[in-house]
Amino acid sequence: MAAPGLRLGAERLFAMPGVLELLSRSNSTSQAFAEVLRLPKQQMRKLLYPLQEVERFLAPDRRQDLHLRIFDPSPEDIARADNVFTATKGNRIDCVSSAVRIDHAPDLPRPEVCFIGRSNVGKSSLIKALFSLAPEVEVRVSKKPGHTKKMNFFKVGKHFTVVDMPGYGYRAPEDFVDMVETYLKERRNLKRTFLLVDSVVGIQKTDNIAIEMCEEFALPYVIVLTKIDKSSKGHLLKQVLQIQKFVNTKTQGCFPQLFPVSSVTFSGIHLLRSFIASVTGNLD
Ligand code: GDP
């Protein structure tokens, strides 16, 4: 994570136009991020910091309910994280293995993060968006009922592994809980679990099963709110406040800051990449 002195993420980016200019001219900034830096300010804020963007619509006394800036990377850190997610000759990104059982899971020494969520929550779309800087990566979707669902392991250079877990819900295979439960319980190098919740409908019964699992195994996990482009600002704020209250009062292991994303508009994708890079030790 950024050094405390650098933690003024959004403010720093918007208060100092020089930062934008320097970054967009720097050779180490990916082309994709340089393009983001050329967007009009408001569009850029919405894309990079979706929660801070909706904060403007909250009454000042409600703002302290939301933990908006616990993870607030500097623009330089966002650019570094984008580089980690960019496929190059020296930074290969690909799906290295699929497994139906934990004892078939590859033995990968690097830090790992995994994504779990109900079927249809937007998990494949989100993983595709995260890997949009590695267009060769194929995110497999197997949704037909009866198809065996697998855990897919994506190696991101020498940095970390991203694991796409099968979706739960009415189409989940019967042994789903066993597979996910065993993975979550036994995977030693698992650094963070990203639990996806559909921002349109909020936390559902089946999401609670996953939340209880994470709590029971004392795993550090994060709630990612998907499909934020589908709701009005008012509805999104209502859901965000409700889920934040749930996180504050009912969870122990959940990271207090929510991560809203849209795989359609790409809002929040850069911030999520930065968080993944940070929890796997790649922004130190
Ligand atoms: P999965 O079953 O969790 O892998 O879900 P998918 O990624 O396949 O998404 C399920 C449906 O939601 C598909 O029709 C997607 O096009 C749609 N979807 C996924 N993410 C988003 C998003 O961010 N915004 C919108 N509007 N639709 C989305």
Image (spheres, rainbow, N blue to C red):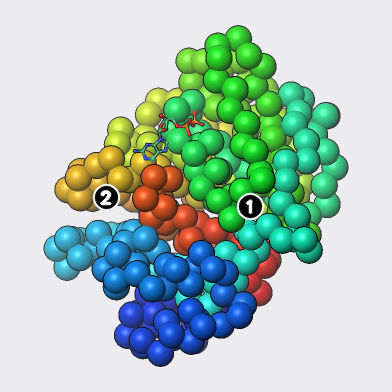
- The answer to whether residue 257 is above or below residue 195 is below
Whether ligand 1 has any atom under 8 Å from the Cβ at mark 1 is answered as no
- Looking at the image, which residue is at 76% across and 28% down? 99
Q: Can residue 52 be seen in this snapshot?
A: no
Between residue 102 and residue 45, name the one nearer to us.
45
Check disc 2 and give the amino acid type.
Leu
Q: Quadrant of the C terminus?
A: bottom right
The 10 Å Cα crowd at callout 1, few under 14, some 14 to 19, many 20 or more, is: some
Compared to 271, does 188 lie above or below? above
**Residue, disc 1:** 134
Report, in whole angstroms, how far the alpha carbon at label 2 lies from the one at label 1.
34 Å
Viewer-nearest residue: 154 or 86: 86
Residue located at (72% from left, 46% from top): 94
Say which mark, if any, is on residue 241: 2
Which element is circle 1 on?
loop
Amino acid type indicated by mark 1: Ala
Q: Residue at x 36, y 41 (%)?
A: 227
Does residue 142 sit above or below 63 in this rendering? above
